[in-house]
Image (spheres, helix red, strand yellow):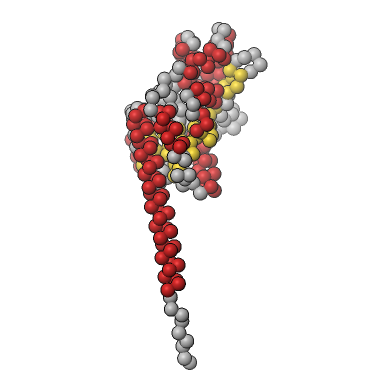
C-alpha cells in the first residue's frame, strides 16, 4: 500500500469548478476578466484580478467565504479520505494557487491527507491584497514545454516525483485530471501506472486523439461517484497485484533455499 502515489489535479477534479473563475464570478469581476483575458497569461491575469477585487473593497475574508462555498461532489471528500486511510501517498499538481487550494482543503477537512501541493504561490501582502505568482518564472527561466502553459509544466513535476519515488522504492502512480495541462503529465506515466481523465473534458479528448503516445491504462470518470468507485478499485487492484507479486517472490525464495538445502554433498571423484 505504501507503494501507491495518487496525484490529483484540483479544479474540476477535486472541486467541480475552476476556482479562479469561481472567485472572479462570485465577486462580480467577470466583465473585466473577460476584457483582459486575451491580453496576458492566465496566471498574470489572476494576480491582476486580485488587485482589482482589492481596489473594489473586497477583503481576504470575502475571498475565503467565497472559497468555502465552492461546489464539491459529496463523494469526493470520502474518496480522498479512504485513499489516505489505505496508505496512499496523495499529492496535488494544480495550476490554481496555494491560497485557494489550501483554504478549500482545510475547510472540507482533507488538507492533512496530502503530502505535497504543487501549485502557483500565493500570499497576502502588507496591504491585505492577495498576490498570485507563477510556479515557474517564465520570463527568466521558461520550462520549454510546448504542451503546457508558460507558468507550469505538470509533466516536469511528475518526472521529479517519479525520480524521488524510485529512490524510495515506490512503484505505482494514479493520476487524476481534466484539463489541457493534465495531458503532458499523463504522457510521463508508465505501463504499470493508471490515469483517470474526466470524460468529455480536454485531457480525455487529447488522450483519445493520441492513444499511441499513452502508456498507462486509461480509466475515465464523469462525476464524484465514479471518481470514488474507480479510484478505490484501482488502489485495490494495485494492492492485490503487489501482494501477489510479493507472495510469489517470497515463495520462490523459500523454494530456492529449500532446494539448496536438499542438495546432496558432492561425491569425491577418483583420479
Query: Where on the picture, by quarter, is residue 195?
Result: top left
**Which quadrant: the N terminus?**
top left
Position of 230 relative to 252 (above/below):
above
Query: Where on the picture, by quarter, is residue 98?
Result: top right
Position of 237 relative to 78 (above/below):
below
Q: Is residue 178 visible?
A: yes
Residue sitting at the far bottom: 271
Q: Position of residue 260 (x, y in %)?
A: 44, 71
Position of 151 relative to 85 (above/below):
above
As drawn, is 35 to the left or to the right of 238?
right
Q: Position of residue 200 (x, y in %)?
A: 33, 28
Measuring 44% from the left and 19% from the top, which residue is drawn there?
Answer: 70
Measuring 45% from the left and 84% from the top, which residue is drawn there?
Answer: 267
Disc count in the image?
0
Query: Where on the picture, by quarter, is residue 4?
Result: top left
Q: Is residue 145 visible?
A: no
Measuring 62% from the left and 14% from the top, which residue is drawn there?
Answer: 128
As drawn, is 214 to the left or to the right of 51?
left
Measuring 44% from the left and 32% from the top, which residue is drawn there?
Answer: 80
Amino acid at each position: 500500500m505504501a507503494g501507491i502515489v495518487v496525484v490529483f489535479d484540483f479544479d474540476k477534479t477535486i472541486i467541480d469548478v475552476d476556482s479562479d473563475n469561481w472567485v472572479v464570478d462570485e465577486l462580480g469581476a467577470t466583465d473585466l476578466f473577460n476584457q483582459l483575458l486575451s491580453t496576458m497569461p492566465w496566471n498574470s491575469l489572476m494576480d491582476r484580478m486580485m488587485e482589482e477585487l482589492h481596489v473594489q473593497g473586497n477583503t481576504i475574508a470575502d475571498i475565503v467565504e467565497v472559497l468555502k462555498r465552492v461546489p464539491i461532489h459529496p463523494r469526493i471528500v470520502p474518496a480522498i479520505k479512504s485513499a489516505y486511510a489505505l496508505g496512499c501517498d496523495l499529492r496535488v499538481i494544480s495550476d490554481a494557487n496555494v491560497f485557494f487550494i489550501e483554504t478549500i482543503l482545510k475547510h472540507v477537512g482533507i488538507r492533512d491527507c496530502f503530502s505535497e501541493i504543487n501549485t502557483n504561490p500565493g500570499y497576502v501582502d502588507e496591504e491585505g491584497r492577495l498576490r498570485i505568482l507563477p510556479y515557474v518564472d517564465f520570463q527568466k527561466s521558461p520550462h520549454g514545454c510546448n504542451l503546457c502553459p508558460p507558468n507550469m509544466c505538470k509533466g516536469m513535476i511528475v518526472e521529479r516525483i517519479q525520480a524521488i519515488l524510485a529512490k524510495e522504492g515506490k512503484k505505482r502512480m494514479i493520476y487524476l485530471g481534466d484539463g489541457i495541462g493534465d495531458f503532458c503529465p499523463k504522457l510521463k506515466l508508465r505501463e504499470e501506472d493508471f490515469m483517470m481523465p474526466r470524460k468529455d473534458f480536454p485531457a480525455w479528448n487529447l488522450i483519445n486523439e493520441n492513444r499511441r503516445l499513452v502508456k498507462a491504462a486509461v480509466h475515465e470518470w464523469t462525476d464524484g461517484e465514479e471518481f470514488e468507485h474507480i479510484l478505490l478499485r484501482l488502489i485495490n487492484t494495485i494492492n492485490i497485484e503487489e501482494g501477489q507479486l510479493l507472495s510469489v517472490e517470497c515463495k520462490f525464495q523459500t523454494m530456492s533455499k529449500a532446494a539448496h538445502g536438499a542438495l546432496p554433498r558432492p561425491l569425491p571423484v577418483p583420479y
